[in-house]
Image (cartoon, rainbow, N blue to C red):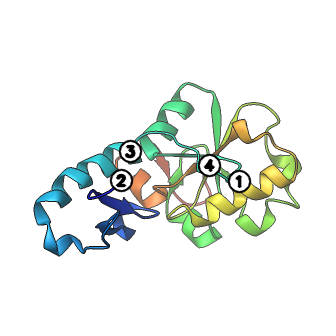
């Protein structure tokens, strides 16, 4: 939108801010940053699908609700040492590079919530699952990542315990 600040980024910690029509830096209009920051944070809490992605992006809060309702399974796709350092309680552990060869281990019903540290590997894992035939309406990327899950005090397990 002309003359409006927009925030572009994968995660709140990786945002880039600028003017949509003039390319101005936020330093030129610091008062606009606050309003746009609030909009970005609100949008980060709503499920959304980006064109071309075969999954829906969700926050840790949304993932927690889906898991609590029994409608989903979390799939942690990080390395073993990352998984053991803390993961969603009850999560399946299938490293991203093993999603295709271990696809049969994923539940056939319900939502699949892929999670990593920042949303990159989990997005790739969701794409792998789609390529193997999983319906895109079952695939979700918890883009906040496991550190945000733990920081929010959500149900967490450690070590090899699921």
Q: Position of residue 159 (x, y in %)?
A: 56, 61
In the rendered image, residue 20, in percent from the top left (x then y), is placed at 35, 63
State the SS at label 3. helix
Q: Is residue 125 left or right of residue 12?
A: right
Q: Residues within 10 Å of mark 1 (few under 14, many from 20)?
A: many
Side of 138 relative to 101 (left or right) = left
Asked if labels 4 and 3 touch by Cβ distance under 8 angstroms, the answer is: no
Q: CA distance from mark 3 to mark 1?
A: 21 Å
Residue 2 against residue 18 in the figure, above or below: above
| Residue carrying label 2 | 1
Q: Earlier in the sequence, mark 1 or mark 2?
A: 2
In the image, which disc is placed on residue 43? Answer: 3
Q: Nearer the viewer, residue 149 or 20?
A: 20
Question: Looking at this view, is 3 or 35 the one in front?
Answer: 3
Mark earlier in primary sequence (4, 2): 2
- Check the image and report above or below for 135 versus 146: above
Upstream in sequence: badge 3 or badge 4 = 3
Tell whether label 1 touches label 4 (CB within 8 Å).
no
Distance, label 3 to label 2, CA atoms, is: 17 Å
Label 4 vs label 1, nearer the camera: 1
Q: Residues within 10 Å of mark 2 (few under 14, many from 20)?
A: few
Question: Which corner quadrant of the image does residue 110 belong to?
Answer: top right
Q: Which residue is mark 1?
A: 126
Measured from the top left, where is residue 38 in percent x and y? 24, 48
- Any mark on residue 148, and which? none
Residue occupying the point 45% across, 55% down: 144
CA distance for labels 3 and 4: 31 Å
């Amino acid at each position: 939108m002309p003359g409006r600040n927009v925030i572009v980024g994968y995660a709140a910690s990786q945002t880039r801010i600028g003017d949509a029509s003039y390319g101005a830096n936020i330093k030129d209009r610091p008062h606009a940053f606050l309003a746009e920051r609030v909009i970005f944070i609100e949008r980060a809490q709503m499920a959304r699908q980006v064109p071309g992605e075969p999954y829906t992006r969700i926050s840790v809060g949304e993932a927690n609700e889906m898991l609590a309702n029994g409608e989903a399974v979390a799939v942690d796709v990080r390395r073993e040492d990352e998984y053991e350092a803390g993961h969603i309680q009850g999560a399946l552990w299938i490293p991203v590079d093993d999603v295709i060869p271990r696809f049969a281990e994923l539940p056939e019903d319900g939502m699949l919530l892929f999670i990593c540290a920042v949303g990159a590997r989990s997005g790739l894992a969701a794409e792998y699952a789609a390529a193997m035939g999983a319906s895109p309406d079952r695939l979700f990327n918890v883009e906040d990542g496991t550190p945000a899950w733990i920081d929010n005090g959500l149900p967490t397990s450690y070590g090899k315990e699921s």
